[in-house]
Amino acid sequence: AVVAFFTVVTALTIGYIHCPMLALVLTFTFPLVALGGVMHMRAMVGDSKATRRAYESGGMRASEAVANVRTVASLGREKTFSGEYCTELVAAGKLVRRRALYAALSSAVTQFIQFGTWALAFWYGGILVADGDCNTQDMFIIVIAIIFSSQQVGSSLLLITNVDAAVDAVDSILSVLNRVSLLDAEAPTANAIKDVAITGKSKFQDVQFEYP
C-alpha cells in the first residue's frame, strides 16, 4: 500500500509539473487502468489455482489406482476406476472452461481500457502540442509516467490481500524453528533405553478380511 501510494503521488506530480491539462485528463483514467490491472492479475492467478484444484481429485484417484494396480487387476476393477477418473475429468473440464471464459473476458476488458487510455492520451496530447500548450517531450513523459504507474498500482493492489497469509506463514515457520523439543538428545540418560531388553508378543483373534 505504501509503494502504491508513493507511486501515485510521484506520477501525478511529474504529470502536473510538465503539462497540467493533459495530467488532469489522465488523472480521471487512473482508476480505470488500475482496475484493469487488478482484473487481469486476478484472472491469471485465479485461473491457475482453480485449474490445479479441479484436477487434484482425479489425480489422487488415478494415483491410488496405480499404486494398488495389482489389487485392482486381481479384482477386475479397471473399468470402474477408469470411469471414475473420466467423471472427475469431465467435472474439472467444465470448471476450467468457465474459468477460461472469465479470464478471456477480463483480458479483453483490460486491453480495451489500456489501449483506450493510450489513444485518449495521444489524441488529446496531440491537440495540446498542436495548440502550443505542451511540447512533444512533456507529452511522452506524462503519458508514460501516469499510465505505467496506474498499471503498476493495479498489479500491486492485488497482492495486498496476500500479506496476511504471508505473515501467518512466516509466523508458523518461525514457531517451528524456535520450538524447544521436550526430548533432549544430548542428555546423559538419552541412550539408557539401549540397555533395556524389550520383549513382546503379538496375537490376532477373530480377524476377518474380505475384498469390498
Image (cartoon, grey):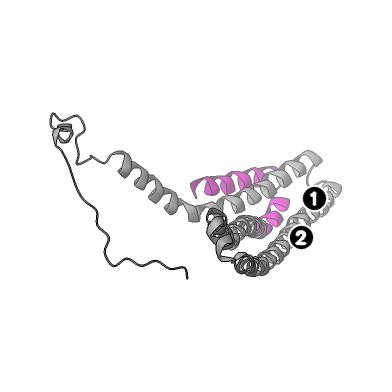
Residue 80 left/right relative to 20: left
Residue 128 left/right relative to 99: right
Residue 111 is labelled as: none
Q: Which contiguous range is marked in magenta? A: 1-30
Disc 2, SS: helix
Q: Amino acid at mark 1?
A: Gly
Q: Nearer the viewer, residue 15 or 47?
A: 47
Q: Amino acid at mark 2?
A: Phe
User: Residue lying furthest right in this view?
Assistant: 130
Mark positioned earlier in the residue sequence (1 or 2): 2
Q: Residues within 10 Å of mark 2 (few under 14, many from 20)?
A: some
Foreground disc of the pair 1, 2: 2
Q: Is residue 17 magenta?
A: yes
**What residue lies at 69% left-to-right and 61% top-to-bottom?**
103
Position of residue 122 relative to residue 65, above or below, is above
Q: Which residue is mark 1?
A: 125
Position of residue 25 relative to residue 141, above or below, is below
Q: Is residue 69 magenta?
A: no
Residue 112 is labelled as: 2
Per the picture, the main secondary structure of the magenta-coloured stretch is helix
Position of residue 154 relative to residue 206, above or below, is above
Residue 207 left/right relative to 33: left
**What residue lies at 66% left-to-right and 47% top-to-bottom?**
16
Position of residue 188 relative to residue 96, above or below, is above
In the rendering, at what x and y percent does residue 186 appear? 19, 29
Residue 125 left/right relative to 147: right
Q: Nearer the viewer, residue 58 or 111?
A: 58
**What residue lies at 43% left-to-right and 53% top-to-bottom?**
165
**What residue lies at 62% left-to-right and 56% top-to-bottom?**
48
